[in-house]
Amino acid sequence: MKLNRRKNTNKMRSTTHSLMKVNEFAPIINEGLYAIDFKLERFHYVPAYGFFLYGHSRDEVMNLGYEFYRTIVHPDDLPLLKKMYTIILNCIAKGLPDDMNYFSLTFRVKDYPQVNKKDYMMILLKLKPVFHGGEIRFGYCTVTISIMPEPGNLRMYYKSSANYTSYSLENWCGKICRVEPLSEEDRKILRYAKQGLKHEDIAEALCMAGSTLGRKISAIFQKLCVHNMEQAIVYATNHLLILHETPCTPESNNKKYHRKLTPEVVQHIQACLNNNQSVNSIAKEIGVSEKAIRKAINNGILTKNSSD
C-alpha cells in the first residue's frame, strides 16, 4: 500500500509539473492553448483567458468537459470532429512514428464577440501527444484562425521532414504528401519576415508591388500548409528551409535596390517608360525600388504612356 501511495504521489507531482509548464507558456504564444487527458476524456488544462474560451470562463469549460465542443462547433462539423479524434486515437493505439511531431485539423466554430464578420469561422487545431507514465496520456493543443476553406484536413507532421501524412476520413488511411519546394524568392521573403521587416519594406527590397507580394505570400502559405507568417517562419526554420542561410537585408542583400533617383537614373527610367516597359521590370533592371518609381510618376517627375 505504501509503495502504491508513493507511485500515485509521484504521478501527481509529474502531472502538476506538466501543468505548470503549460501555464507558463500559455501567455507568450499567439494561439489559444489547452490540454486534454486521453485517459480520463476531459480537459487537462484550460487557460484563464484567451482565444480558446470563446466568451466562457475557465471553470465553465472545465465543468462542461468535451460537451464544451457542442456549444462552439458548427453542428455539421461535430460528427467530423468526432471522427478525426477517433482516427487520432487509433493512430496512437497502433503506435506513433518516432519522429512524429503533431496532428493538425480544421473545423468551424462560432464567432466570438471580438470578430463579428460572420457567424462561424474556420480554425486550425494542432494536437501534440505527450507521454506520461510510459504511455501517451495527454494532448497539448493550440487553436488559431485558419485559411482553409473546408473543414477536415487531418494531417500528421514530422520532426525530421517537411512532408506530412494526410488522412482520409472515409477509410482512415494515411497518405504521405510532399511539400512543394520553396523558390529562392520564397526563401528571401521568409528571411526578410523573420528579421522583422514589414510588408511594404519587403516589397521595396524585392522591387515588387505590395499586391504582388501579397499573392506570393499566400502561395507560400499554401505550399507549407500554414495559416499565417509566424507559422510559415517557424515551419520553414524547423524544417531547415531557411535555418542556415545568410541573413538577408535590403542593404546587404543587394545595394542596387536603394539607388537614388539621380538625374541620370531618372533619364534612364523615362527612356524605359517611353518604350512601354513595366514599372516592375524597370525596377529590377535599374535597381531602384518600384515604390520610388511610382512615387516619381505621381509627383510628375516621370511620365508613362500606358497604365502599368
Image (cartoon, rainbow, N blue to C red):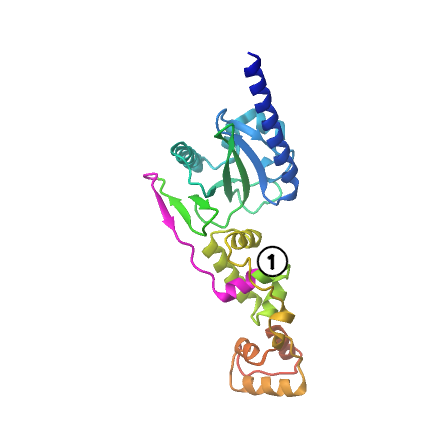
Residue that appears at 60% across and 65% down: 248
Residue 260 image offset from top left, x and y in percent: 67, 79
> In the rendered view, would you say 59 is above or below 207?
above
Q: Report the side of 147 relative to 175 (left or right).
A: right
Residue 171 within the segment the image draws in magenta: yes
**Magenta stretch?**
170-190
Residue 106 placement (x, y as % from top left): 47, 43
189 inside magenta stretch: yes
The residue located at (40%, 31%) in the rendering is: 93
State which quarter of the image contains the N terminus: top right
Answer left or right for 25 relative to 133: right
Please state which amino acid type lies under the numbered disc 1. Answer: Lys
Residue found 62% across the figure and 83% down from its top: 302
Few, some or many residues within 10 Å of mark 1 (<14, 14–19, 20+): some
Relative vertical location of residue 224 with respect to residue 188 in this rendering, above or below = above
Q: Which residue is nearer to you in this view: 260 or 188?
A: 188
Residue under pointer 1? 194
The extreme left residue here reads: 171
Front residue of 230/302: it is 230
Q: Nearer the viewer, residue 269 or 183?
A: 183
